[in-house]
Image (cartoon, rainbow, N blue to C red):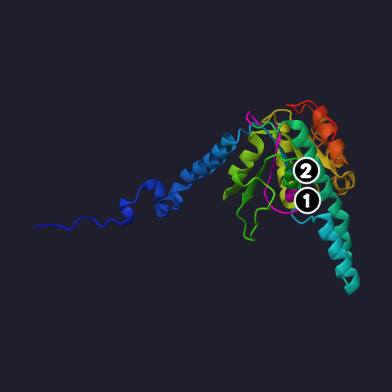
Amino acid sequence: MTRDPPDAASPVLALPAADAEILLRDEMRGVRLAVEYSKAELALRDWGVRSTVVVFGSSRILAPDVAAARLAAAARAGGPALDAARRAERLSAWYGEARAFARIVSERGGALAAGTLRENVIATGGGPGIMEAANRGAADAGAPSIGFNIALPTEQRPNPYSTPELTIGFHYFAVRKMHFAMRANALAFFPGGFGTLDELFEVLTLKQTRKVPALPIVLFCRDYWAKAVNFPELARLGLVEESDLALFEIVDSAEEGWQAMVRGGLPVATPLRER
């Protein structure tokens, strides 16, 4: 008796690596984690990225020109939106500092070393706000930068300034966090919300427990950090050691942040030069 050959379109005959139905099963989560890690790893290697300076901060902080336009519109309209527009305009100064800081790092740190391994390449979460500002500052310097984007319930679209080939999507926060940490020579934290604080306390814990090298951690905006987190009170209560307060430094400007990182041991691949 003659039997018909298997249907060529049958999912069972599909190559496993191209079979989305199989790869998305719960039992294949470990494989997906490995693939997500490897995809980012290969992209960074292809661009010769050996080390990074990671910039964190709020996705809600506006560029100064956008904030000024909104403030002007709110002033004309009046009402309760005016106070919010004023706050946004004040915070927008940190967009400018993040942009300036990323340009300084890109120009002085080794990210422009085309044809060889790149050092201290700016890396962000790839979204708007402070992340956009940092990617934009790297672009101002003509340097590549990384956007480790994450799929969120409220869609986070990649900003237009990270290098397209280095704008990488993630599903798993854990894999994304690993890539933030594993090449970092230093980390910068600008004013932000839960996500920024999550990343800060995670990396402080890793540094405190010596799970990562003694890399510089720099916090921008003394006024914000004095109000957002009472670090001295943690030490006064004995919940952290007094010496733990030296795990980070707080600064108020882009240049001050760069100098703090250099003092903290940031490896600089190119000679320092004036902007």
Q: Position of residue 264 (x, y in %)?
A: 80, 28
Residue 91 pos. (x, y %): 85, 54
Side (left or right) of 46 relative to 19: right
Name which residue type carries label 1: Gly
Q: Is residue 112 shown to the viewer in this render?
A: yes
In magenta segment, residue 142 = no
For the C terminus, the quadrant is top right
Identify the image quadrant of residue 249. Answer: top right
Q: Is 217 situated left or right of 168 in this image? A: right
Residue 71 vertical placement versus 146 (above, below): below
Instruction: Characterize the magenta stretch by its predominant secondary structure.
Output: loop
Q: Tell me the residue that label 1 is attached to.
A: 192
Q: Is residue 20 left or right of residue 49?
A: left
Q: Residues within 10 Å of mark 1 (few under 14, many from 20)?
A: many
Magenta stretch, residue numbers: 115-132
Residue assigned mark 2 = 189
Label 1 element class: loop
What residue is drawn where x is 87% and y is 69%? 74
Please name the residue shown 53% across and 42% down the image: 39
Q: Work out which quarter of the rendered image holds the N terminus and state it.
A: bottom left
Spot the residue most to the left: 1
Q: Are marks 1 and 2 in contact (CB under 8 Å)?
A: yes
Pick the front one: 54 or 143: 143
Taking the magenta stretch, the answer to whether it contains residue 128 is yes
Q: Is residue 216 visible?
A: no
